[in-house]
Amino acid sequence: QLQVQESGPGLIKPSETLSLTCTVSGGSISSNSDDWGWIRQPPGKGLEWIASLYHDGNTYYSASLKSRVIISVDTSKSQFSLNLSSVTAADTAVYYCTTRLGQISSWGQGTLVTVSS
Amino acid sequence: DIQLTQSPSFLSASIGDRVTITCRASQGIHVYLAWYQQKPGKAPKLLIYSASTLHSGVPSRFSGSGSGTEFTLTISSLQPEDFATYYCQQLNYYPLTFGQGTRLEIK
């Protein structure tokens, strides 16, 4: 089972673009994953799926975030990324990256991103 | 989008109790459902996948059942470390939606 770890800025200003990277270890990112995804959790709230990139190249986005989100993968670096543009305070959350093989998902420990001026 | 509704949203129980949490899907998702346990400040931990398969290392007091639109997570005898929030997630269709969570507290 792969291990994943998020990295990115802990603090970002309103209207900027949030860029997060997930580094995958413990095996081949290509052959040990069906999809790569991002999930977030605002403080004190539930889990919200953001986006997934399937191994066939298809991308899937939350309807509420679709206009602002891009997910991409760089298999040569064993990394995948999330870009979220025009952030507001409502985007403050812990962001988790996940990889999924079949029905088993591996999660990172999460990274807190605060949107504040 | 598939909506997942968990019940109850809050549950108060005692050590040794048997508890059941239900997750209902707005349309059929076969057995493509996972259950997670989350403790404060920690990432969700996978307990059950494919509706009823216990993930590696998860105690056998946890069990899952169901298919189609109705699923349950059962803890046969609550232990102190089980007090946490539990989420279901469907993996049949994108978007991969979650239930709203069930908070399990000590009575």
Image (cartoon, rainbow, N blue to C red):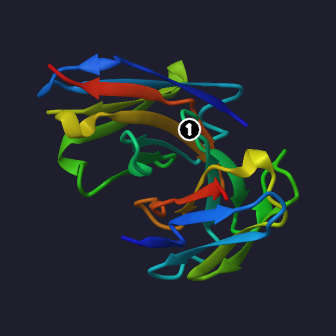
- Left or right: residue A39 versus residue A63 is right
Q: Nearer the viewer, residue A24 or B2?
A: B2
Task: Farthest residue to the front: give it.
Answer: B107
Q: Amino acid at mark 1?
A: Pro
Judging by the rendered image, the residue that carries numbered circle 1 is B40
Task: Farthest residue to the left: give it.
Answer: A15
Q: Position of residue B52 (x, y in %)?
A: 76, 68
Of all chains, the one bearing label 1 is B
The image quadrant that residue A38 belongs to is top left
Task: Farthest residue to the right: give it.
Answer: B60
What is the secondary structure assignment of the residue under circle 1? loop
Q: Is residue A44 at all visible to an observer of this figure?
A: yes
* Count of all numbered marks drawn on residues in the image: 1
Image vertical order of residue B53 relative to residue B84, above or below = below
Image vertical order of residue B96 relative to residue B31, above or below = above
Q: Position of residue B33 (x, y in %)?
A: 61, 66
For image coordinates 73% across by 50% down, the residue present is B82
Q: Position of residue B95 (x, y in %)?
A: 40, 60
For image coordinates 69% across by 79% down, the residue present is B66
Circle 1: is it few (<14), some (14-19), or many (20+) Cα within 10 Å?
few
Q: Which quadrant is home to the C terminus of chain B? A: bottom right
- Left or right: residue B57 versus residue B90 is right
Q: Position of residue A114 (x, y in %)?
A: 29, 26
For image coordinates 11% across by 28% down, the residue present is A15
The image quadrant that residue A78 belongs to is top right
Q: Nearer the viewer, residue B79 or A33?
A: B79
Q: Is residue A57 at all visible to an observer of this figure?
A: no
Q: Which quadrant is home to the N terminus of chain B? A: bottom left
